[in-house]
Amino acid sequence: MPRTDIRNIILHMAGDAEHMARLDCGLRLASRYDAHLEIAFMVSPVGMPAEIQGRGASPVYLAEATEIARERAAEIQKEVISHCRNVGVEWTWEVLEGKHNEALAERSLFADGIIVSQNHGIDPDEQVTLEGPENLISLASCPVLVLPRGRSFPDPVRSVIVAWRDSPEACHVVRRGRALLNTAEKIYLLTVADAKSADAGRDIVGYLRRHELEVETVRDADTRHVGRAILRHADALDCDLIMMGAYGRARWKEMLTGGNTDHVLSHATRPVLLSH
């Protein structure tokens, strides 16, 4: 049987402007579900601006940038320790090197969720950047909670919209995210389908109701712009959280055609829980 509780959360940490918002979210969830908070600070830069590409000293540049990140990690660790002690949650701190998404995905084997920001720590004022969250979602073994810029995580989550299609990805996010559904006062199930698909979502509604979760179904016929439909209904219903399966097609096809997952990730103003 799939786990429905949350016991281990990975929190992506970096020196970007959104790191305290992620920490606040992690502390709220860890406190609510009595979970362990695994804080992973990434120090290895994985890219650099185009204007410095080709510098003969680029290896030296990257080494210096990594050292600066380590110094920044020590500063942020002090903040983290103070906040964790005040809340009283169980937590660990680890500094990770290497490819960021691969390192986080490796840790996800032993986690119930990963918290990242919409820009995944990318700061235009920094000389080095991190990888985007899109690839992490494809690699991770657990759901990824993506927080929008400048918005705090609601606690508790009172209303959730589940973007549904009959696919393994959508099933995964519902099963793995059921702990969040359990606390919601209102659950909306959105199906985007043409008029011929009258039964879309019927089975998942039955599944959730057998788990004592009441669901209100919402339908939209805009099958050409599913990502837009998801965000439109989330705003209209003022939902605290969007849940959706990610990348139903191959990632490279999504990149070529501008897929629904990427559209939601780029334009969401509400937290999004995704699973592949």
Image (cartoon, rainbow, N blue to C red):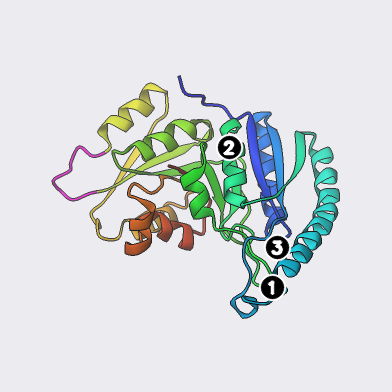
Residue 93 visible within the image: yes
- Residue 125: which numbered mark, if any? 1
Task: Determine the image quadrant of residue 108.
Answer: top right
Q: Which residue is mark 3?
A: 17
Secondary structure under the numbered disc 2 in the rendered image: helix
Q: Amino acid at mark 2?
A: Ser
Instruction: Specify whether residue 72 is painted magenta.
Output: no
Residue at x-position 60% and y-position 31%: 110
The reply to whether callout 2 and callout 1 are in contact (CB within 8 Å) is: no
Q: Are marks 3 and 2 in contact (CB under 8 Å)?
A: no
Q: Which range of residues does the magenta coloring cover?
A: 193-200
Residue at position x 55%, y 41% in the image: 157
The stretch drawn in magenta includes residue 194: yes
Depth check, front residue: 256 or 193: 256
Residue highlighted by disc 2:
108
Residue nearer the viewer, 117 or 232: 117
Residue displayed at 81% across by 58% down: 72
Crowdedness of circle 1 by 10 Å Cα count: few (<14), some, many (20+)?
few
* Residue at mark 2 to residue at mark 1: CA–CA distance: 29 Å
Chain-order first, disc 2 or disc 1:
2
Crowdedness near tag 3: few (<14), some (14–19) or many (≥20) residues, C-alpha within 10 Å:
few
- What's under tag 3, amino acid-wise? Ala
- The circle on residue 273 is none
Magenta segment, prevailing SS (helix, strand or loop): loop
